[in-house]
Amino acid sequence: MGVLAALGSAICYGVADFTGGLLSRRAYFVVVALAGQAGGLVLALVTAPLLSKGVPDVAELAWGAASGVGTGIGMIFLYRGMSRGSMSLVVPVSAVTGVALPVLVGVLLLGDRPQALSWFGLTVAVPALWLVSRTGDGNREGLGSAASSDGLIAGCGIALQYLALVQAGGGIWPVAAGRLAAVITLLPLAAPTRKRPRITTRNLVGAVATGMTAALALILYSQAVRQQLTVIAVALSSFYPAIPVLLGITLLRERLGRIQVTGLVAAGVAIALLALG
């Protein structure tokens, strides 16, 4: 069940990533992220009393809030990079950083000891994430560019989100605390100006639905870490970049390059190894 929950988290996050990327090109990216986190907060507040047992302690809520700060940072820089048209570099850098840091922390500090088969899966997962995230859009920005910086900072935020939820011990109340913290983090940056067009009602609804989907991803992830090692749950949940690729093929009729095909195949191998390990 832990494997299924982590893969479900990846699917939900991938859908949210896909729709959030499209919306961030139509409206100010911070407003899109803020509306999304507000939607996620509503979903978490509705589901937490129904599905949670007991009242969380202060430490759990504090770790949940820390995860929300990570979410806010991750979304700001991820959406900013994508709104600049730098998806081919921002997404893979953020994806690889977002999985590599939690794996290192899990092994070095949290005492995770994956089996040999899982280690093979983790070894394949990192290059698979990089390859599957590449869009092949002709972007030639170097590793010192603003796009790679956006991706690196976004990845650090995503890593904080994952690790803080592990420390929170799972559950939905910490996810709700995280969405509140994310809203507070994003709110000062969302002030309207003349240079920023107002978001349309249609895009606002889309952003709220996107945030609810992302919150569901975190709820599934919080269940996965209760049943799996942190490094395994993070790695499986981090395959979300494959979902926008598949949606691009089916909905936008995009064509895959050889790099992405290689990445999808490698991702399938890594998922199988992690699930069996």
Image (cartoon, rainbow, N blue to C red):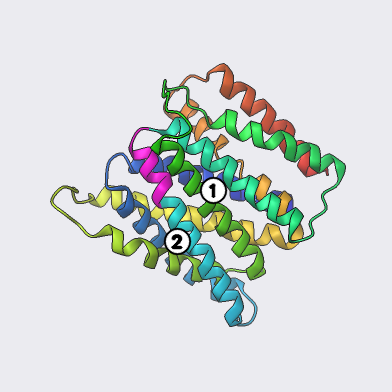
Provide the secondary structure element on which disc 1 rests: helix
Image position of 221 with respect to 184: above or below: above
- Looking at the picture, tell me which residue is in the foreground, 176 or 84: 84
Percent from the top left, x then y, of residue 27?
27, 45
* Range drawn in magenta: 76-85
Residue visible at 36% across and 44% down in the picture: 80
Percent from the top left, x then y, of residue 176?
50, 69
Quadrant of the drawing holding the C terminus: top right
Residue visible at 58% across and 53% down in the picture: 159
Residue lying furthest top: 258
Is there any visible trace of residue 124 in the rendered image?
Answer: yes
Percent from the top left, x then y, of residue 83?
34, 39
Tell me which amino acid carries mark 1: Cys
Residue visible at 67% across and 33% down in the picture: 267
Percent from the top left, x then y, of residue 31?
30, 54
Q: CA gap, disc 1 to disc 2?
A: 12 Å
Residue visible at 48% across and 53% down in the picture: 213
Q: Main secondary structure of the magenta part?
A: helix
Task: Determine whether, in the image, residue 140 is placed left or right of residue 217.
Answer: left
Q: Which mark is residue 212?
A: none
Is there any visible trace of residue 233 in the rendered image?
Answer: no
Residue position for label 2: 40
The local crowd at label 2, few if under 14, some if 14 to 19, many if 20 or more residues have their Cα within 10 Å, is many
Q: Which mark is residue 12?
A: 1
State which quadrant residue 264 falls in.
Answer: top right
